[in-house]
Image (tube, grey):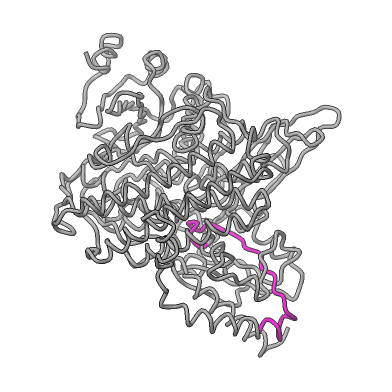
Amino acid sequence: MSYKDQLKQLFPSITYDEETDLEEYVFINPKEIVEISKSLKSLHFNLILEFGVENFKNHKGITLIYVFEKADYRKLLIMQSKINNNAESIAQIYPTAMLYEREMQDGFGIEFNHSFDTRKLFLHEYYPEGFHPLKKAFTNAHLKLKGKVSPSEEYVFKKINGEGIYEISVGPIHAGIIASGHFRFNVIGETILNLEIRHFWKHRGIEKCAENKTPEEGTVFAESIGGDETIANTLAYCTAIEKISGIKVSKRAEHLRLLCAEMERIYSLLGDIAGMIVDVAYPVGASQFFNLREEILRWNERLTGSRFCKGMLIIGGVSKDVNSKTLDELGDYLNYFYSQFTNSFLKILENASVLDRFETTGIIKESLVKPLNLTGPLARASGVNKDERICHPYTKIYEQIMNPNKILNEGDVLSRFRIKANTIKNSANIILMIIKNMPKGEMSVNYDIKDGCSCSIVESSRGQNIMFINIKNKKIDRFKVRTASFCNWYAIEHAVMGNIVPDFPLINKSLNLSYEGNDL
Amino acid sequence: MNSPLFRIIAPKAKKNRDDEELKRLRLELKRSIGSVFGRSMAIREVDTGSDGSPEIELVNLTNPYYDIEQYGITFVASPRHADVLMVTGPVTCNMVTPLCKVYEATPSPKWVIALGDDACGIGIFKDSYAVIGSVDKVIPVDVKIPGNPPIPIDIIKGLLELIEKIGKEGY
């Protein structure tokens, strides 16, 4: 019996909606969401996304969509709940729901009953009161911001009182060449007692900007979600549109797409590894990895015309073919890369002063992985084998050519360092296999856009990126994206506890989460 | 392929077509920073809503391939230490106040570079509710470096343009 049938037995009011090979849609009674969530939790389902859509499937008001996944179950269970302006919070059952609900509270003005945190999320103090950008009644245009903010309107951080406890507030503009984010520490002596992060300084309104655009115009918005996740997000976007319209991409285009995706994973994780070594004051060791990253970026330019592979992925395939001579040369380079990388990596691990800083620093416990929906290398360093290339395969290619991932249980900076290195080596091997198996075929196919909605999941360098696209009258009606960083950011609040303040940059770099992918 | 011999004879990364130009630009940089900035130019990077790629390229400028630090350019941790602010992104509503504060905190004489299409006001977000549109709508901008994102060579050219401008117009 499928899980939705099990649920139907418990909750007769559930009605079935469409079903694809990766998604199961059902309608639920809004009043029963808390009970349904409890049952799903006991069935080991996890909430991975919750968001709203206005004017969806003949419902004038707002439809809340809850996306659930289960570790050994390929399909996503998608609950649709038709509400007006009020819903029950499920944050008591799934802690990550608190963020999604705060997001919807800003976006649509939905009120959540029994919610334990109702502070604003992405609309900061200077936005006018009662402004909800995702409502269809609002047409995208510049706003008149508040001139002044009174102290009572300011964001409230958690206060910790006691003898000898002091606050350090960092950001939004903080040291280094880095994006904007705010960190509020409570410290006793040198030890961090509590950290609260506040983000969304870089909120650009991507979701609204993409609305009413044609699917082709929407591609640049998917690319701009995050510079170092360009391919991952565009891949999720194109996959969603292709699923809706029934477009079949040629085998060659599929291989080229994955080649770019793995190149992106390599350069992105190389940056993390180099950054971690810089943060323990060992720039000589780091420069090896910076060199390799520059070489990969130059290869990207050679393969796609852009150092960040921008413009490579299009709906229906890829925009540029790569000739076999270039592919052979890339194969030679990757063999050289592999040996260079392995050598440099082993040398770093021989260095006692590096290990001293890496070991037992910033531990993320395995018990946090599921409640916070932590994904990617970060989960694999904390004992959970989470990789969407295997858990929710968006292509058949990976299962044929991918080596099994390494899993470590310690959850400290050192294990993240090693897992990331392993992921890089794995990706290099995948690319070599792709080059070996590269089939002949079309670059892109012709297509017709159809109306409908779809949810797609992709493994980016940081973990699970999920995208929901609804097409109405051949235009984008709703563009919802949640990158891995949105959930993974909250791991840092737990990882730094009990560590000393000077280790914070290292822990931050070992996670290297995306600010722009979080803020949208 | 993993033999020690291969490591010696293996081609280093492909020669970039810009390598010759890079050599010329770096000498130019050294000369002009020496004469106009007294050998050191301090840059504070401010991100007001970019997609993260301009930051990656700025970090790349300090890698051994470009290594602009040896020509006198340093990226500093605080605007109080900076001569130049390098602003990326279309200036989100949430970042207007921090950007103004950073500008005020930077000691005079100071200059501002807008880096990337978004910062120059020609990016895809310029009409969004969540942004102001371009850096020059908030603080005065001296040089614009367009690109999505601008490649390292273009950033160096932009820096030279600024130094040349200051050399001509004075502080």
* B81 within the magenta span: no
**Foreground pick, A168 / A285:** A285
Write down the region rendered in magenta: B32-54
**Foreground pick, B153 / A519:** B153
In the figure, residue A412 lies in which quadrant?
A: top right
The residue depicted at 43 percent of the width and 25 percent of the height is A87
* B40 within the magenta span: yes
Q: Give the vertical position of A184 relative to B128 (above or below).
A: above
**Foreground pick, A145 / A490:** A490
- Relative image position of residue B118 (x, y in whole percent): 48, 65
**Foreground pick, A322 / A331:** A331
B162 left or right of B108? left
A499 left or right of A146? right
A147 left or right of A65? right
The residue depicted at 28 percent of the width and 28 percent of the height is A74
In the figure, residue A155 lies in which quadrant?
A: top right
- Relative image position of residue A150 (x, y in whole percent): 70, 45
